[in-house]
Image (spheres, rainbow, N blue to C red):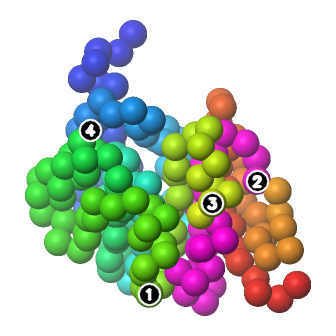
Amino acid sequence: MKSKQAQNQVRINAGVWRSRLLKFPDAEGLRPTPERVRQTVFNWLGQEMTGKTCLDLFAGTGAFGFEALSRNAREVVMVERSRTAYQSLVQNKTLLMAEHAQILHQDAMQYLLQTQQQFDVIFCDPPYQKGCVEQVLPHLPKCLKTNGVVYVEAEFAIAPTAHWEVFKQSKAGNVYYHLLKYSSVI
């Protein structure tokens, strides 16, 4: 069994901060995405994030956001409601000197309703069993740049809809993960 300390850290897989460990606190519902899932997602995205703007919605540990920055993303906005997790994100930003990370202590839906910013990649890994995926998906199209993609992690498989194409998907244990593209044309 892993020690408590080992369970409360995630490793950045690639880029300028490769192998750096990010510590995170115990917080309700905080479950970092497994390392191999993150590796697969960045393989799907093409490894390099140079020049891309990203939104890490429900940022939690910040693993996706810091990984994107490590891979040369131009900017990452991380949104986290939990004060404990938010404080940890700020500490990790300072530790990494991640000047292109904008960390917001805010509810994800509140952020989506007020933002005018658009992103190339949106990482959406909300708490399970709370209906968050169904709540946020209708608000994501206005936040996507042309040809933007949405990563969604959930406790269930997401089915394609009239507007959302599921163009990559997989499962690891009880985690379903997907890359979605939006089309306004039916």
Residue 158 badge: 2
Asked where in the image residue 84 lies, by quadrant, the reply is top left
Instruction: Please tell me which of labels 2 and 3 falls first in the chain.
Output: 3
Question: Relative to 154, is 70 above or below?
Answer: below
Q: Which residues are magenta?
A: 137-158
Q: From mark 4 to mark 2, how far is it between C-alphas?
A: 28 Å
Instruction: Pick the residue in front: 163 or 165.
Output: 163
Tag on residue 116? 1
Circle 1 sits in a helix, a strand or a loop, which is it?
loop
Q: Which residue is mark 3?
A: 135
Left or right, residue 121 beside residue 64: right
Q: Quadrant of the rendered structure where residue 103 is?
A: bottom left
Q: Secondary structure at mark 4?
A: loop
| Amino acid carrying mark 1 in the image | Gln
Q: Earlier in the sequence, mark 3 or mark 4?
A: 4
Q: Position of residue 3 (x, y in %)?
A: 29, 15
Amino acid at circle 3: Gln
Give the image location of residue 122, x and y in percent: 51, 68
Residue wearing tag 4: 24
The residue drawn where x is 28% and y is 65% is 104
The three-letter amino acid code for the residue at tag 4 is Phe
Compare marks 2 and 1 and give the one earlier in the sequence: 1
**Marker disc for residue 161:** none
Give the CA separation, mark 2 to mark 3: 14 Å
Name the mark nearer the viewer: 2 or 1. 1
Instruction: Choose top left, top right, bottom left or bottom right for residue 133.
Output: bottom right
